[in-house]
Image: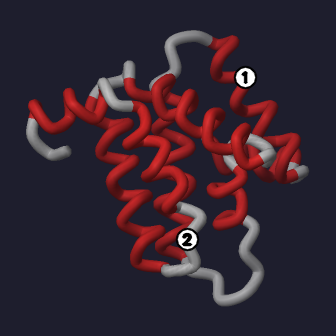
Amino acid sequence: MLYVDGMNGVINHNETIQWLYTLIGSKFRLVVKTALKLLLVFVEYTESNAPLLIQAVSTVDEKRGAKPWSNIMEILEEKDGVDTELLVYAMTLVNKTLSGLPDQDSFYDVVDCLEEECNLGEIWLSLLF
């Protein structure tokens, strides 16, 4: 993924991004951390990757019958053994994804979905900015 040819392959193969997003739901901390870091690299590579990540998230969670971004929300809502490093990576991924969206409608669609899922209202929105 770190080289141009590898990243172009990942960009053209959304199933890889879906797989990485699925790994965020793992019970193993190191797997979750690595998947979050790789998704951050993907989103930061170019702004046009943010919609691809959103598409992958929607596909995975739709197949599971879960709300979009549920894997990220599980990290952010974790009550036992709060791991601040995972929290930082998860929030950074959300922020980078939102900042890479091409229009306000897409931005607010994702924010509304996240807000609906976590029910944190203004606290959640204050974390985004």
Q: Is residue 63 left or right of residue 38?
A: right
Q: Amino acid at mark 2?
A: Ser
Q: Which numbered disc, 1 or 2, marks the residue closer to the eye?
A: 2
Q: Residues within 10 Å of mark 2 (few under 14, many from 20)?
A: some
Point out residue 103 in the picture as x, y percentages from the top left corner.
Answer: 58, 10
Q: Secondary structure at mark 1?
A: helix
Q: Is residue 52 left or right of residue 98?
A: left
Q: Is residue 117 above or below residue 112?
A: below
**Quarter of the image with the C terminus in it:** top right
Point out residue 77 in the picture as x, y percentages from the top left corner.
Answer: 75, 67
Mark 2 or mark 1, which is nearer the start of the sequence? Answer: 2
Q: Residue sitting at 52 percent across and 21 percent down?
A: 101
Q: Is residue 34 above or below residue 5?
A: below
Q: Residues within 10 Å of mark 1 (few under 14, many from 20)?
A: few
Q: Residue sitting at 43 percent across and 58 percent down?
A: 36
Please give the residue where the numbered disc 1 appears in the rendered image: 108
Point out residue 54 in the picture as x, y percentages from the top left corner.
Answer: 56, 31
Q: Which mark is residue 66?
A: none
Q: Amino acid at mark 1?
A: Tyr
Return the residue nearer the eye: 21 or 64.
64
Q: Going by the picture, which residue comes out furthest to the front?
A: 63
Q: Which mark is residue 26?
A: 2
Point out residue 17 in the picture as x, y percentages from the top left corner.
Answer: 42, 41
Q: Is residue 32 left or right of residue 98?
A: left
Q: Secondary structure at mark 2?
A: loop
**Quarter of the image with the N terminus in it:** top left
Colour setting: secondary structure
Q: Residue sitting at 28 percent across and 35 percent down?
A: 10
Q: Residue sitting at 54 percent across and 55 percent down?
A: 22
Q: Is residue 69 left or right of residue 121?
A: left
Task: Report the number of numbered marks.
Answer: 2
Quote the CA–CA distance across marks 1 and 2: 28 Å
